[in-house]
Amino acid sequence: MIENLKKYYYCLILFGLFNFFNLNAQKIVNIQSQLEGNYIIIKYDLVHTKFYQEFNISVYYSADNGLTYKGPLRNVMGDVGKNVLPGKQKTIKWEFFKEGVTFNNEHVVFKVDAEVIAKERDRMLLTCVSGNLHTPFGLRFGIIGKTGFYLNTNVNQHFFKKAEYEFINNEISDYNKPEYYVFDSSAVKPKLTSTAGLTFQTGKNLFLYAGAGYSFKKVYRIIDTYSYSNDNFVEKYYLKDIDLSRDGLIIETGGIYRISKYLVFSIGATYDLEYVNWLAGIGINF
């Protein structure tokens, strides 16, 4: 039984290798040709490629139905030579008379070879405004390319508010004003998220990102103070509720899509202290 399993395992390996080489060998498919005046028009599909690849295309012909090939052809134009991009219905025009080639009812077939050229992926500067319902004001800065990085910070409209006192166990610590106070029923929640991470290009215009950082959510209760002598309003103060305020690690992941040469759109999800939240942005790259 062990020997049978070994044979099965080796068959799987050979099958996988066959498919690997087959996929890599089948970049050129659907080769067609037709005579048009002094030209032979050759069409082909260049498929199963990576978005960052370009190709050096060479063409060969056979007058014996593919037993032997001659070439590469020289008097050609179109989707041939260096820096050819992938796609379907690629076209080559061959001016065969200039190469001294004549055909006398032979069954002529063509072979198109593609040499892979790994195109250098540009690294571009990224600047985005970003936000969500909890932290609507933010900025993302970084570099995108094959790999890159980013920095992102978001705050809300209460971020710059400061608390004069702390509220712990339902008591105000160190309250030293000569006025009496009344609790306001409302509260404000200053919030910040700040992250950094890496970007990875996974498509021609698609970049994934993942990062981590720091976040805090403060809960400020509000008291209004009044004069003992005439009950007139004196001032408003913020109390930081220690029991409800949180800070800690934040992690995030998402994608950046390049809409045009300069415009990008990003959307992702953050695990922010106690819940998952979304984060969207729009910006420019150059």
Image: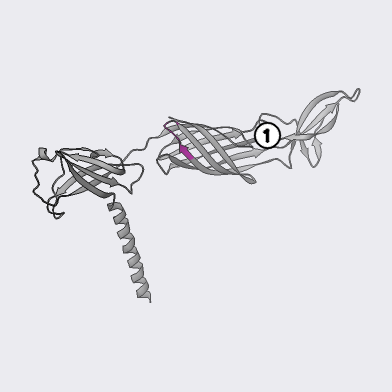
Residue 4 part of the magenta-drawn span:
no
Q: Is residue 274 rendered to the left or right of residue 251?
A: right
Identify which residue, 103 or 173, lies in the foreground.
Answer: 103
Position of 48 relative to 258 (above/below):
below
- Amino acid type, callout 1: Pro
Q: Is residue 259 left or right of residue 106?
A: right
Residue 151 coordinates in the image, percent (x, y): 52, 35
Check disc 1 and report the residue beneath it.
190
Q: Residues within 10 Å of mark 1 (few under 14, many from 20)?
A: many
Q: Residue 175, position in %: x, y?
A: 81, 32
- Can residue 177 be seen from the camera position used here? no
Q: Residue at x 44, y 41 (%)?
A: 206
Quarter occupied by residue 187:
top right
Assign the N terminus to one quadrant of the image. Answer: bottom left
The residue depicted at 37 percent of the width and 72 percent of the height is: 5
Q: In this picture, is 26 found above or below 53? A: below
Q: Residue at x 15, y 42 (%)?
A: 73
Quadrant showing the C terminus: top left
Q: Please, which colouring scheme is shown?
A: one colour
**The magenta stretch spans which residues?**
256-262
Decide if residue 242 is on the left or right side of residue 214: right
